[in-house]
């Protein structure tokens, strides 16, 4: 028997405390022994590649990775998502590979823009969410206000599981509402060092608050949580060690084990014997000396064994996976076996792409890994025309990784790239230069957004494309794309061509 799996991600707005919480989960999960290792590891990794200079300059993390730890007989796979707002597309894809998520909120700021966007992605896939209200060691907003905001903005039932006894200067601990035990701060650092007290005396105001809360909010219901209709809410301070252990317990007790995954012809149950999985991320050039890439595959069913042959659906021959990588917090190990819910890294030379299904028999295809309509389009201008071939390869590579999208217009020779955030433009230029030795610039494109188009009747599609040739392009996979000058224009053509479908996301 293998241990149960919990495959999850942390979603948050930058600065809410995701890095700190990640580190503390690994620490309390027994995976690391010194605080600060997550960052140190990040810096080592950053030193490896030139284009990551941007990360260093801006102090952000562009790449995402996987951290595995074991606690209480359960194997946790924590999928790290890039925190910067600009890298949301990569983050969205990572969320397709988890079974649940922890949403971190800053007690002084409540729900912020990025939290909300990521939450919407979780909701699309009914990913259940545990909420962590962080930084109660500082002055925050009133507890009721925070709970009501979560409930109203996210249209979810909230169920407080713990309660902060004071915040900031008056912070006296975290009360567990089901055990009635309080975790107390200790020493000059006011950290949690294991001191708990049963049935504590609480200030009257707090006792009253708790009574009101228990009457006013939904009682925790595991079924409603797993359906994505209710979120249990924990309060704490990642920095001061309040909360991480509660969250590990919550994941163990309530979070779903690997779930059936949406696929064609039918959803794939983790119990099925045949090994299947999908690639949700490809990271190229992790080592500038080698042109290798790592494809991150989520295993959906079967027991994976090293050396096994897996076939990418739709293209390619079976590949033998001789050196799959498992990701532990402190090192990478070659995996001999992996189970549903696990993430394995598969080194390859560009054969594997984001969205690929891998399976033993190749008669299944996972669905629902989205491409998002880019919000920024730019024309790529070469400074040296002898480099056209290299440029095309670079743009295709990066589109394949899902970092940027590329569109080849039907008319004219100016290739257009699309991104969902400004910073990706800098990453693109920097990588073109460092990895492909291509000097290029970007110019404004006469378009503002893109839509993938389709129609049930091929004649309708042809009619539309013939009449709009100047705005037609193909994406990297040859799918027809309509480039629009504005969101208004999208609405306009939609009204005029009701039989053509304009999609802002494209499933791969
Ligand atoms: P992020 O990954 O979500 O962007 O957030 P990160 O953990 O880096 O935390 C952002 C800032 O908030 C950091 O401070 C961090 O120390 C602080 N922080 C995180 N959790 C808590 C908490 O529970 N209480 C308090 N008071 N602060 C918290 P910084 O000064 O920006 O960075 P650093 O130099 O201290 O690392």
Image (tube, rainbow, N blue to C red):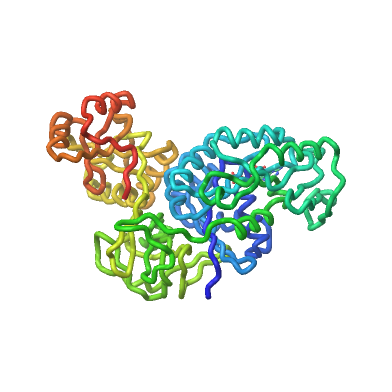
Residue drawn 87% across and 46% down? 201
Q: Position of residue 325 (x, y in %)?
A: 46, 68
Residue 238 in sight from this viewpoint? yes
120 or 283, nearer to the observer: 120
Is 36 positioned to the left or the right of 480 in the image?
A: right
- Identify the image quadrant of residue 461: top left
Q: Is residue 434 above or below residue 293?
A: above
Residue 433 in sight from this viewpoint? no
Is 11 positioned to the left or the right of 348 in the image?
A: right
Residue drawn 23% across and 36% down? 414
Farthest residue, direction right = 201
In which of the image's four quarters is ligand 1 placed? top right
Residue drawn 29% across and 69% down? 361
Number of numbered discs: 0
Q: Position of residue 297 (x, y in %)?
A: 41, 61
Is 189 positioned to the left or the right of 329 in the image?
A: right
444 or 434, nearer to the observer: 444
Q: Position of residue 439 (x, y in %)?
A: 32, 43
Residue drawn 63% across and 34% down? 148
Q: Position of residue 266 (x, y in %)?
A: 33, 58
């Amino acid at each position: 028997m293998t241990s149960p799996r919990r495959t999850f991600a942390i979603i948050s707005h930058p600065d809410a405390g995701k890095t700190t919480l990640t580190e503390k989960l690994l620490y309390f999960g027994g995976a690391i022994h010194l605080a600060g290792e997550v960052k140190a590891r990040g810096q080592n990794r950053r030193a490896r590649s030139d284009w990551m200079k941007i990360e260093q300059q801006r102090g952000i993390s562009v790449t995402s990775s996987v951290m595995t730890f074991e606690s209480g007989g359960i194997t946790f796979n924590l999928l790290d998502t890039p925190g910067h707002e600009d890298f949301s597309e990569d983050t969205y894809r990572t969320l397709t590979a988890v079974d649940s998520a922890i949403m971190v909120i800053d007690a002084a700021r409540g729900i912020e823009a990025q939290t909300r966007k990521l939450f919407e992605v979780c909701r699309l896939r009914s990913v259940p969410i545990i909420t962590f209200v962080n930084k109660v060691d500082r002055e925050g907003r009133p507890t009721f206000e925070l709970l009501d905001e979560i409930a109203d903005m996210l249209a979810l039932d909230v169920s407080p599981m713990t309660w902060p006894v004071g915040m900031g200067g008056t912070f006296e601990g975290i009360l567990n509402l089901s055990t009635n035990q309080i975790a107390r701060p200790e020493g000059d650092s006011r950290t949690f060092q294991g001191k708990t007290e049963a049935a504590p005396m609480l200030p009257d105001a707090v006792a009253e608050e708790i009574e009101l809360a228990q009457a006013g909010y939904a009682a925790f219901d595991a079924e409603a949580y797993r359906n994505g209709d209710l979120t249990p809410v924990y309060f704490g301070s990642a920095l001061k060690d309040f909360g991480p252990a509660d969250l590990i317990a919550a994941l163990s007790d309530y979070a779903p084990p690997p779930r059936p995954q949406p696929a064609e012809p039918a959803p794939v149950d983790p119990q099925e014997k045949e090994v299947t999985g999908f690639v949700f991320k490809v990271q190229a050039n992790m080592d500038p000396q080698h042109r290798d890439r790592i494809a991150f595959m989520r295993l959906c069913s079967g027991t994976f064994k090293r050396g096994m042959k897996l076939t990418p659906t739709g293209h390619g021959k079976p590949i033998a996976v001789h050196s799959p990588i498992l990701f532990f917090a402190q090192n990478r190990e070659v995996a001999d076996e992996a189970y549903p819910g696990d993430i394995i890294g598969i080194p390859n030379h560009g054969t594997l792409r984001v969205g690929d299904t891998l399976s033993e028999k190749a008669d299944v295809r996972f669905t629902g890994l989205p491409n998002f309509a880019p919000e920024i389009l730019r024309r790529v201008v070469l400074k040296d025309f002898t480099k056209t071939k290299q440029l095309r390869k670079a743009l295709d590579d990066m589109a394949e990784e899902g970092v940027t999208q590329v569109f080849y217009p039907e008319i004219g020779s100016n290739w257009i790239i699309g991104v969902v955030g400004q910073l990706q433009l800098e990453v693109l230029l920097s990588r073109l230069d460092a990895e492909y030795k291509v000097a290029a610039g970007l110019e404004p494109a006469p378009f503002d957004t893109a839509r993938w188009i389709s129609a049930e009747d091929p004649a309708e599609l042809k009619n539309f494309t013939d009449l709009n040739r100047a705005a037609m392009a193909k994406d990297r996979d040859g799918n027809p794309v309509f480039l629009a000058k504005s969101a208004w224009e999208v609405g306009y053509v939609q009204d005029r061509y009701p039989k053509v479908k304009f999609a802002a996301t494209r499933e791969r």
